[in-house]
Image (tube, grey):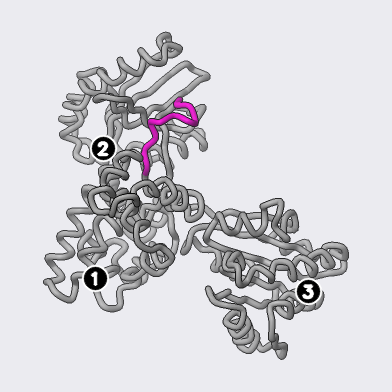
Amino acid sequence: MRDVLGRKRWFFLQITGRRRIGKTALIQQALRHAGVEKTLYVQIPDSDPSGVVAACNGYLETFGLPHRISSLAELAKLVGMLAREGYVLALDEFQYFHRKKLFDFCSFLQAEVDELAADADRVPGGLIVSGSIHAEMTALLEDRDAPLFHRTTDVLELDHLDISSVREILLSHADDSPERLLFLWNLFEGVPKFYRDAYERGVLGADRRALLEQLFFSSSSPLRNEADNWFLRELRGRYDMVLQYLASHPGCTNADIEAALANVSPAGEVSQVGGYLQTLSQRYRMIERRLPIFAAARARSGRYYIRDNFLRAWLSALQRPVSAVAFRPVEALVKQADERLATVEGYGLEDLVAQVYEERSRRGIGDFSLTESINGYWDRGDVEIDLVAIDEDDKRIRFGSCKRNDTNLPSSIDALERSVHRFMTAHKRFRQWHIEYICIAPSICDEVRQAITARAAIPQSLGDLVAEL
């Protein structure tokens, strides 16, 4: 952002990322640090043209600008005029211009952008567009048939905070115990806004149930309506049913989803499951289809997962208790939500460990360098390996079992060895490689470590893995 603003010439910057990831805060901070005084921020409403015009005029008044518009065409002309005057304009929720009733704005803006680009050295201002629905932002700015195709000068995609950043927050404001890291990461992942909410409520370092009560169950809780407002408000009917099933059955197959919906749907509607899954994965990026490591892209062994930790935690553990807060004692509902979250954390641990492994390898930390993304492996029958890590350079392959309770690790080694035997049968190129077995839990006591080591496996706690980050 500093580089873009420091050019002092026309730019058209696209910023994408999930809701609450910090797009608006990044823009505000960057403009302030760059000393940009001429700014205009407009949050585009999900409305018709008259609603957008009214919202823009409201922001113009708020920012002390005398201009007013009466149409989308005039909004586009305003962008060009202000950019020539040295203003940096930010249009937030830009994806709403993908709506049919607002789409004409893209053609109006194209004409202005082309003129500004042709005279870029003499245009001191610029335009920032940001949005949270990736597919619609892509359709507006990157599809070849779109009016604004190839017009952006810069693209920035914001992702979650990495594990080391989350750990830095905990070291500064709470504690970095592996149990707290797993609890908060499974709930908030790397969304800065959520950690800030917990900090401002004074519960970032509190016990689990105090944090849940303050953030979700009181009348002024900041996250009480978060999922409904920012994830689910645009979805209706069967989409919600699919998400609910995926939240409580992570790693299910297409056939599993079809069977579940068949039990509650009229005849004929189950055939639409593929369309629901495609929309949720491609347009909203709420779910993803994972394949076992080394599987072909068109393999039928794919499993579906909710991509976002917060959405998964909300649907599987928090939504129903929070909705019942007016009818049952809060203490009982918080206890119920906490117990359900503990179950979800079992699945979240695998994702967290995979991310930690990749982050360690990227930073050159630890004893294992990855040469491809870490993943799980499964097959028909009882073959199930939580993690498979590949070091092609040193011909090492590491197979892992993850358990939230460390006492379950020693008994899991037999099943892991059987699954690895099936893996080796299917992937013969690894037979001459050095094979390692790892057993992972948030914390591992000395007695369990000794039992794991006695089975020629490597005990690794989450605390061990993040210590050097």
What amino acid is at disc 1?
A: Phe
Distance, label 3 to label 1, CA atoms, is 47 Å
Image depth: mark 3 or mark 1 in front: 3
Residue at 22% in and 63% down: 320
Image depth: mark 2 or mark 3 in front: 3
Quadrant the N terminus occupies: bottom right
Main SS, magenta residues: loop
Answer above or below: position of 72 versus 122.
below
Q: Alpha-carbon neighbours of circle 1 within 10 Å: few (<14), some, or many (≥20)?
A: many
Q: Alpha-carbon neighbours of circle 2 within 10 Å: few (<14), some, or many (≥20)?
A: many
**Residue numbers of the magenta segment:** 294-304
Say which quarter of the image contains residue 382. top left
Answer above or below: position of 200 versus 345.
below
Q: Nearer the N terminus, badge 2 or badge 3?
A: 3
Residue picked out by circle 2: 441
Residue 217: give its label.
1
